[in-house]
Amino acid sequence: MTYATPADIAVLLGFSFTPEQNQQAQGFLDDAEWQITNRVPDLAEKIAAGKISAASVQRVEIRAVRRTMLKPDGKDNE
């Protein structure tokens, strides 16, 4: 389960996603969630205990996917 949705990313970017972009965004969110839970395996428990806020995790996921969608090759400058 991701804490962010493709709609959250679309709002940040300021446009609506096509069905294909929506699917791509969800895939990127799933990847981001996997990376986060690899670093913090007990993430859900920490959120439930109030040690980490779900909103913070959501922001991290949104920003990671936004960055990936805007710069898929990972380059800042050519």
Image (tube, rainbow, N blue to C red):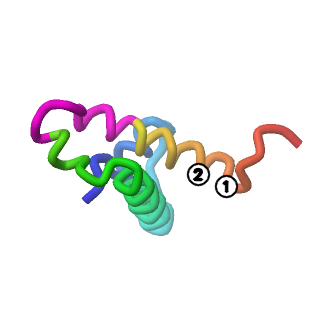
* Label placed on residue 12: none
Q: Whole-percent x and y of residue 1?
A: 25, 59
* Residue 58 located left or right of residue 9: left
Separation of disc 2 and disc 1 at Cα?
6 Å
In percent of width and height, residue 73 lies at 73, 55
Q: Quadrant of the C terminus?
A: top right
- To which quarter of the image does residue 49 belong? top left
Q: Give the residue type that dot 1 points to.
A: Pro
Q: Position of residue 42 (x, y in %)?
A: 23, 50
> What's the magenta region?
48-59
User: Label 1 neighbourhood size at 10 Å, few (<14), some (14-19), many (20+)?
Assistant: few
Q: Residues within 10 Å of mark 2 (few under 14, many from 20)?
A: some
Report the residue that reaches farthest toward the right.
Answer: 78
Q: Are marks 2 and 1 in contact (CB under 8 Å)?
A: yes
Task: Please tell me which residue lies in front, 77 or 9.
Answer: 77
Q: Which residue is mark 2?
A: 69
For the point 76% across and 39% down, which residue is it?
76
**Which quadrant would residue 38 be assigned to in this image?**
bottom left
What residue is pinned by disc 1?
A: 72
The answer to whether residue 47 is above or below residue 22 is above
Element under disc 2? helix
Helix, strand or loop at disc 1?
loop
Residue 68, position as x, y percentages in the image:
59, 50
Instruction: Say if the magenta span includes residue 19.
Output: no
**How many numbered badges does the structure rendering display?**
2
| Residue drawn at 24 percent across, 33 percent down | 52
Q: Amino acid at mark 2?
A: Met
Which one is in front, 27 or 45? 45
Who's the residue at 59% across and 43% down the image?
A: 67
